[in-house]
Amino acid sequence: MIATLDTIFTRHREQAGALLPILHDIQDALGYVPEEAVPLIAGQLNLSRAEVHGVISYYPHFRQTREAGHVVHLCCAEACQANGSEALAAHAAATLQGAKVTVKPVYCLGLCASGPAMQIDETRLVARVTTEKFDALMNELGARA
Amino acid sequence: MSITLYVPGDAAARALGADEVAAAIEKRAQEFGIKVHVVRNGSRGLFWLEPLVEVLTSRGRVAYGSVQAADVGSLFAANFLEGGEHPLRLGNIEAHPYLSRQQRVTLRRVGVIDPRSLSDYLAQGGGLGLAQARQLSPAAIVQAVTDSGLRGRGGAAFPTGIKWRTVLDTGADEKYIVCNADEGDSGTYSDRLLMEGDPYCLLEGMAIAGLAVGAKRGYLYVRSEYPDAIALLNAALDNAGDWLGDFQIEVRRAAGAYVCGEETALLESIEGRRGIVRSKPPLPAIAGLFGKPTVINNVITFASVPDILARGAAFYRDLGVGRSRGTLPFQLAGNLKFGGLVEVPFGSTLRELLYDYGGGSRSGRPLRAVQVGGPLGAYLPESQFDTVLDYEAFAAIGAVLGHGGIVAFDDTVDMAKQARYAMQFCAHESCGKCTPCRIGSTRGVEVIDRIRAGQREQIPLLRELCDTLTDGSLCAMGGMTPYPVLSALNHFAEDFE
């Protein structure tokens, strides 16, 4: 971890307001922002640990623990609500109990004309999701209970 | 000679299988020994037809709609590389009534060009605004923007020229240009379409703003939910060479906080802090990023500027109605048959968008409520569908046009539930700095729950609470949450009984 952090700190040495870019790089590299990284970041940026912790905990994107298994973000914003996202969320909750996937809400993926929309593991977007399409994708992930 | 094909690399097209289609086409072409060049263009915004594949033939571009990887075999069999007949064939997509009736100005290159190619951009009329701006004095650039009548497209509709004038007139050793690309409103995606389909247009607009006010540095703050847009903007910057002169742009990735779309919270976030709203004054134009005078505008605002410089302020000002000049890229979303991007001058009606373009509901049921302007915009009932699309006309009926996002609901919608959602969303996303927004939103959820449980005597309390939010909040997050709540209560009272 230390070597990773050093590389990241070097990359951002000259950058004004570098805290968010540093946190992004750490999470991209390690999958999360470890607790042990907080004092090191604080020292690097001449901030207090509280300030760094405050930023990490403020932004929903940052996490301090590793995700176990797959993460599916279901869009719950209005445009997807208008196309049945609530029923889809209920279906997900009912069929994925105890499965290796965590379903989380997200407020808008920008696919508002093609809802309901979802994102798998922060990389793959899927639009016009039906329950059949959802089940097939979950099977693909090996995530059905 | 290779054959050029266009398979959108836009996130919405990819979410509908465009990557698989592109891979299948390349694989099949290789098997047949045919050389193909697949351009990953932006989306033209006709989402019910995505993935929309176009083939460049001797008779122009021929489109095939809703293509899936499984269709690729039959497309080759139908000789689609020469524009052959096929059930998915649409012909020239620009002749499609959805597009031919529009007046695309700002987004005219989206879906047409290769977004990664600066030479493609320049060949399609890009770059003329920046070249023109380099011949003008800063004051003359600001004057042109003022004369065009352009107002901020992020939702607040503040006159862009006045904002730029303030920054120009404020003396400082350093100034900044900041682009707000934190497009978090549900029902809006025009920023995303532009960034993924024509990123150079945005970069050009920011560089012109730099010349106009004397700034050498720009920041582009993009929401983390848009990884494709971030990648494209970075690719565009890498390929820009010295086209932007000494103007430097840095892309900043947001981190999932909706309230960072509020301009002062956004500045806090770029500076490396929690995205908490600042008290105004001072305005960002006087003391913005790192305390310096800052132009902060939305993506579409900046992207509108190159044409204003290249074609003259009068060209832009002559479009539109009243004090709403130019065009607005409306975004049809939610329960509509033909959801997509419709760029037209101000002045048509909501009904035209919903039915002539949108084709009515996707579910086939009657449309009952339409939310315009994002989660902080009002819900409009059918009786208001003839409202003219113009900032002032919407303000006059207690609604907002905002960023032009339009989310349609059919008659299965429960408007008391939508009102509750608006309060809940505010509670979820409030930055917590001011009490009306932080506490009021949570109390709002509770009051609506009691009303829905039958306590109608709580309705006056809800109205009072909305007054407090409107008048007492620091920014639009708390200040505008009453729009969806009160419009639901006023126009759909039966849902609260």
Image: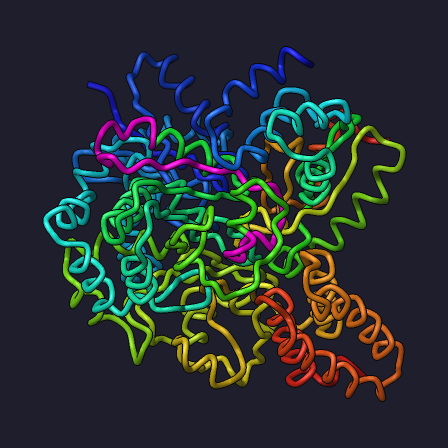
On whether residue B454 falls in the magenta region, the answer is no
- In the picture shown, does residue B8 fall above or below B298? above
Q: In the image, is B154 to the left or to the right of A129? A: left
- In the picture shown, does residue A79 fall above or below B156? above
Q: In the image, is B310 to the left or to the right of B82? A: left
Which residue of the protein is positioned furthest toward the left in this rendering?
B135
Residue situated in front as seen by the camera: B103 or A24: A24
Image coordinates of residue B361 in percent, x first then y, are 56, 66
Residue B197 in which image quadrant? top left
Q: Is residue A12 visible?
A: yes
Residue situated in front as seen by the camera: A135 or B442: B442
Q: In the image, is A57 to the left or to the right of B339? A: right
Residue under the point 23% across and 67% down: B148
Residue under the point 58% across and 74% down: B378
- In the picture shown, does residue B144 fall above or below B483? above
- In the picture shown, does residue B182 fall above or below B334? above
Q: Quadrant of the C terminus of chain B?
A: bottom right
What are the residue bounds of the magenta stretch? B237-265
Q: Is residue A140 visible?
A: no
Residue situated in front as seen by the camera: B132 or A46: A46
On whether residue B260 falls in the magenta region, the answer is yes
Image coordinates of residue B341 in percent, x first then y, are 41, 56
Residue under the point 37% across and 29% down: B235
Residue situated in front as seen by the camera: B324 or B74: B324
Image coordinates of residue B407 in percent, x first then y, are 55, 64
